[in-house]
Image: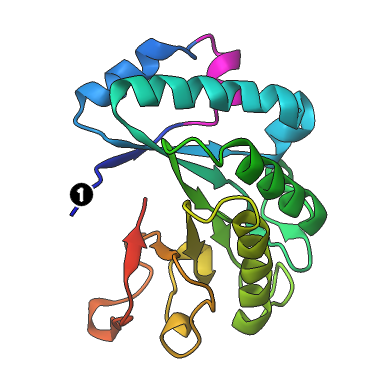
Amino acid sequence: MVVFRGLSISDPDKIDKNGQWGRKHFEAIKSWGVNLVRIPVYPVSIHQRGLDEYIKLLDQAADWCSELGMYIIIDWHSIGNLRMEVFQNDMYNTTKKVTFYFWKTIANHYRNVPTVAFYELYNEPTVFNGMFGTCSWEQWKEIYEEIIDIIYAYDKKVIPLVAGFNWAYDLRPVKENPINREGIAYVSHPYPGKIQTSKRTTVESNIWICC
């Protein structure tokens, strides 16, 4: 059994622009007892820097984490409704085509890098009470499964991480209608105040909890 103690950093593009990107950043993280680093990749950073140049930053992170004995989650850090392509903020703007291409490229590039162990397919899905359009769990589940199929075409050893609706808080649909793919894990972002204690429900599933 492996127990992961994780930490989510800022977008490497932002850290690099602030002059803080380097091995010492990861050495500090390691000193806190961390063995899993979540790396959020913002769509706006890909648009501005370009995917090939951005991957150079991820390669450095993978090298440093390998040397320091830590694993990596690569997180496609968008918030909103990917099905209708309506998002919370311009920094999260993307498309299904760009998302599919991102994961195709990442899966192919890191298929032989065991340090890159997890792919968080989409940070926080939400329709925000209809303000970001509509999307059923069945429709969102289909998009997830398409992304997983693309990833598995290149790498079947990595573990895809799947978030529920309501900013990755609500996994209740998974109980009756789980993702129809092997080797995945589920993500919950347990924000305080999302639901009252007396109304709390339990999802009978293996859940990967990530903040």
Taking 7 as reference, is 22 left or right?
right
Q: Main secondary structure of the magenta part?
A: helix
Dividing the picture into quadrants, the one containing residue 106 is top right
Residue closest to the eye, 138 or 87: 138
The residue that label 1 is drawn on is 3
* Residue nearest the viewer, comparing 48 with 74: 74
Residue at (48%, 51%) from the top-left corner? 158
Residues shaded magenta: 10-19
Please tell me in which quadrant of the rendered image residue 195 appears.
bottom left
**Secondary-structure class at tag 1:** loop
Q: Is residue 16 magenta?
A: yes
Percent x, y for residue 153?
65, 57
Position of residue 5 measured from the top left corner of the image (x, y, whole percent): 24, 42
* Residue 77 vertical placement versus 181 (above, below): above
Q: Is residue 9 above or below residue 3?
A: above
Amino acid on which disc 1 is placed: Val
At 48% from the left edge and 81% from the top edge, which residue is drawn?
178
Q: Does residue 201 sit above or below 67 in this rendering? A: below
Check the image and report above or below for 58 versus 130. Answer: above
Could you tell whether 136 is left or right of 33 in the image? right
Residue nearest the viewer, comparing 156 with 210: 156
Q: Could you classify mark 1 by the number of other residues whose Cα lies within 10 Å: few (under 14), some (14-19), or many (20 or more)?
A: few
Percent of width and height locating residue 129: 62, 75
The residue that appears at 29% across and 85% down in the rendered structure is: 199
Q: Quadrant of the N terminus?
A: bottom left
Q: How many marks?
A: 1
Residue 127 appears in view? no
Judge whether residue 72 can be spotted in this image.
yes
Q: Is residue 39 magenta?
A: no
Left or right: 55 as drawn, with respect to 184: right
